[in-house]
């Protein structure tokens, strides 16, 4: 990528960082860090996650057609980083990260315990976009943890930080 584009993308940080839980082909849970996540429709309520073809998560979502978008808190920074830097293909990173999973309310894919917000999504369509796939998910349930006020963002100097809605 040209240097000015690298700089341009640095300048538009911080950006929210979520951890996407999914099930693999055998039904084993996995968790992957993602910043390319956004709302894309109000009615129905749709989100998109953009997943590189090479990710283990890609295989899992393609097979099971569901995922959970978990917004982790500052206390979960280290765990969040492990989810974004190691592949579930090579071992159990959820265990390594010390994350606990809890049943979701409507889908088989579990939610991360103590996340600030967790959005349960069922895939309604997929779109190929360069080297990533957009998995468009209808949000079928949301879990909110009222004690948690902050979630993680990714910064230009390659860190995860916790911020609230006012940017503090
Ligand atoms: C800050 C940050 C943001 C990321 N955003 C995405 C993303 O939006 N889409 C993606 O495919 N990978 C993204 N990744 C990379 C994956 O989290 C990483 O490759 C992970 O190891 C994939 O795990 P898996 O193979 O278990 O699915 C991001 C990583 C970091 C650190």
Image (cartoon, rainbow, N blue to C red):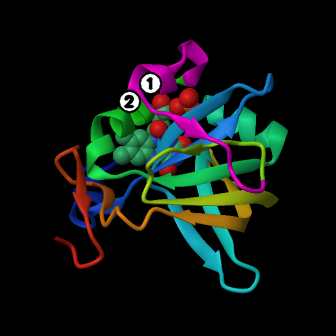
The answer to whether the beta carbon of the residue marked 1 is less than 8 Å from any atom of ligand 1 is: yes
Crowding at label 2, few (<14), some or many (≥20) Cα neighbours within 10 Å? some
* Residue 92 on the magenta segment: yes
Of residue 94 and residue 62, the one placed in the foreground of this image is 94
Does the stretch in magenta take in 126? no
**Which element type, helix, strand or loop, lies under badge 1?**
loop
Q: Would residue 121 be found to the left or right of residue 80 on screen?
A: right
In percent of width and height, residue 136 lies at 72, 62
Residue that numbered label 2 is attached to: 82
Rounded to the nearest angstrom, the CA distance separating label 1 from label 2 is: 6 Å
Q: Residue pushed farthest front?
A: 147
- Horizontally, residue 98 falls left or right of residue 19, namely left
Question: Does residue 126 appear anywhere in the picture?
Answer: no
Position above or below: 147 against 129: below
The verdict on label 2 being within 8 Å of ligand 1 is no
- Quickly name the residue at label 1: 86
Quadrant assignment for the C terminus: bottom left
Residue 78: give x, y in percent of width and height: 29, 34
Quick check: 59 above or below 96? Answer: below
Q: Position of residue 103 (x, y in %)?
A: 67, 43
Question: In the picture provided, is 116 more to the left or to the right than 108?
Answer: left
Extent of the magenta region: 88-106
Height in image: 30 above or below 116?
A: above
Q: Residue furthest top?
A: 90
Left or right? Give the position of 139 relative to 153: right
Front position among marks 1 and 2:
2
Residue 97, by quadrant, is top left
Relative to 102, does residue 94 appear above or below in the rendering?
above
Does dot 2 land on a helix, a strand or a loop? helix
1 and 2 marks in contact (CB < 8 Å): yes
């Amino acid at each position: 990528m040209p240097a000015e584009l690298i700089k341009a993308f640095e300048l538009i940080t911080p950006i929210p960082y979520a951890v996407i839980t999914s099930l693999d082909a055998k039904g084993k849970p996995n968790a992957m860090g993602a910043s390319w996540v956004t709302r894309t429709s109000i009615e129905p309520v749709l989100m998109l996650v953009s997943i590189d073809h090479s990710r283990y998560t890609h295989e899992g979502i393609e097979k099971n057609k569901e995922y959970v978008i978990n917004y982790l808190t500052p206390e979960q920074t280290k765990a969040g980083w492990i989810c974004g830097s190691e592949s579930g293909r090579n071992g159990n990173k959820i265990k390594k990260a010390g994350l606990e999973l809890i049943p979701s309310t409507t889908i088989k894919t579990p939610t991360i315990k103590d996340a600030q917000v967790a959005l349960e999504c069922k895939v309604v369509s997929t779109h190929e976009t360069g080297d990533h796939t957009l998995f468009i998910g209808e949000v079928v349930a949301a879990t909110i943890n009222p004690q948690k006020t902050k979630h993680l963002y990714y910064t230009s100097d390659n860190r995860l930080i916790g911020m609230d809605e006012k940017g503090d």
